[in-house]
Image (cartoon, helix red, strand yellow):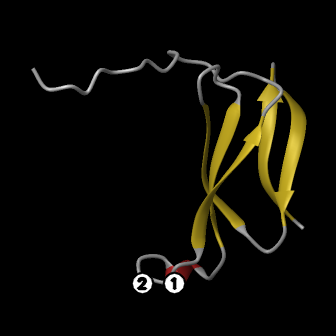
Amino acid sequence: MTPLCALKRAREVTDIIEVPERRAVACTLGGNIMKTLYCLTFDGQMGDIGTGKRVSRIETVSAGIAGSGPKPTRHNNRRR
């Protein structure tokens, strides 16, 4: 298995999430309470990036720690 993402708190690794035969391209914590880990994963070779092959997906998992930074806000998209 290949490690997907390591969650850290106060410089200590708290969890390692593994996904077989995939690569983590980008990961971030988000959601209403900043405890959802969103990871863009890729199944292919680096040369496949940008070729139009459908080998990536966004995966989510509930995290035991919250992300830092501003909390998400809801925007009213109605036109005036």
Asked whether 78 or 56 is in front, the reply is 78
Is 55 left or right of 9, judged from the image as shown?
A: left
The residue that appears at 33% across and 21% down in the rendered structure is 75
Q: Which residue position holds label 1?
A: 47
Distance from disc 2 to disc 1, alpha carbons, whole Å, reads 8 Å
Q: Is residue 61 above or below residue 52?
A: above
Image quadrant for the C terminus? top left
Image quadrant for the N terminus? bottom right
Q: Quadrant of the rendered structure where residue 9 is?
A: top right
Is 20 left or right of 33, judged from the image as shown?
A: right
Tell whether label 1 touches label 2 (CB within 8 Å): yes
Amino acid type, residue under disc 2 in the picture = Thr
The residue that appears at 59% across and 29% down in the rendered structure is 31
Amino acid type, residue under disc 1 in the picture = Gly
Give the mark count: 2
Q: Which residue position holds label 2?
A: 51
